[in-house]
Amino acid sequence: MNNVSELVINYLQRYGCQISEDYKTFLREACEIYPPPHGMAWYGNYYRQFARKPEWFANSLMANAAEEGNGSRKVWQFSRCIQDSECAKLVRSHSIDESRHSKMFVALLNILFPTQLSADFRSQLQALSPNYYHHKHPTTEPINRDSILDTKMVMDEIIKINLLEIRALILQLLLRPVLQAYATPKDLAKVTTMSDLFIYDETKHVEYSAYCIGKYIQQGNQEWVREMMIYRQQTVNEMFLTDVELENSLGTTVLNIDN
Ligand SMILES: [Fe+2]
Ligand SMILES: [Fe+2]
């Protein structure tokens, strides 16, 4: 049994998410065959060791603000390539959440390192988020006539999103005690509430993508999904095994759906 799949299934249950049994079976199998590095003890130890250095940690918060902003834009573009209206709506909502996460990382930077940022730099950081909201966002129209992806390509992206969101959840769990350690007593409650929200949102991102995967399984694509989840867990792991060699990518949320 792999700790990542068990932890995620546990969080999904904790938040009352309804997840298909087939999805859980395939996730367990994928994590068993290709154990995610971000769930291993050495990864957490490595992260905590780096996070002790304030400069590294402040940079890591900035890198996350940038990655969440980029992820939000990419996910919005992806939503415009999806024909299934229910799935497209869920993906748009995801994009809006990541836009908010970018701002939350900047807010954390301001709370934990209040005196070290110039006003100019602060506004540059604010611009990392695309500022998408449910009431204010770019067009939902397809990019062009040929941009609509066939269902298998959409599902491949959704599987990647699902596994990357699992990674995002694990990173939030690693981040939480570090945030609390950097917070002054006055800011501890505020920082903890933000961490709660991050953990909740990332769990919901795993939930909605698992829901789309479950729906596709029900349409008779069980074996394809199973093989794809195993294959994508392998490619996601490879993506981050090279990343840990670069200390500036360690602990950074990446919603890279282009690979
Ligand atoms: Fe996020
Ligand atoms: Fe997310």
Image (tube, rainbow, N blue to C red):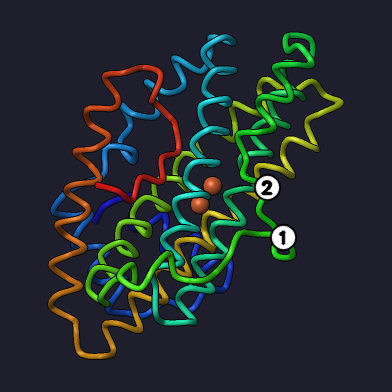
Quick check: 197 left or right of 168? right
Mark 2 / mark 1, whichever is N-terminal = 2
Query: Which residue corresponds to the image point at 33% horizontal and 31% vertical from the top-left?
Result: 41
Query: Which residue corresponds to the image point at 41% horizontal and 82% vertical from the top-left?
Result: 84
| Residue 212, quarter of the rendered image | bottom left
The verdict on label 2 being within 8 Å of ligand 1 is: no
Q: Which mark is residue 16?
A: none
Count of picture labels: 2
Residue type marked 1: Lys
User: Where 78 falls versus 103 (above or below)?
Assistant: below
Secondary structure category for the residue under label 1:
loop
Foreground: 119 or 90?
A: 119
Q: Point out residue 236 in the picture as x, y percentages from the top left corner.
A: 25, 46
Query: Which residue corresponds to the image point at 62% horizontal and 40% vertical from the top-left?
Result: 129
Q: Residue 131 carries which label?
A: 2
Query: Which residue corresponds to the image point at 29% horizontal and 27% vertical from the top-left?
Result: 243
The answer to whether marks 2 and 1 mark residues whose Cβ atoms lie closer than 8 Å is yes
Q: Residue 136 carries which label?
A: 1
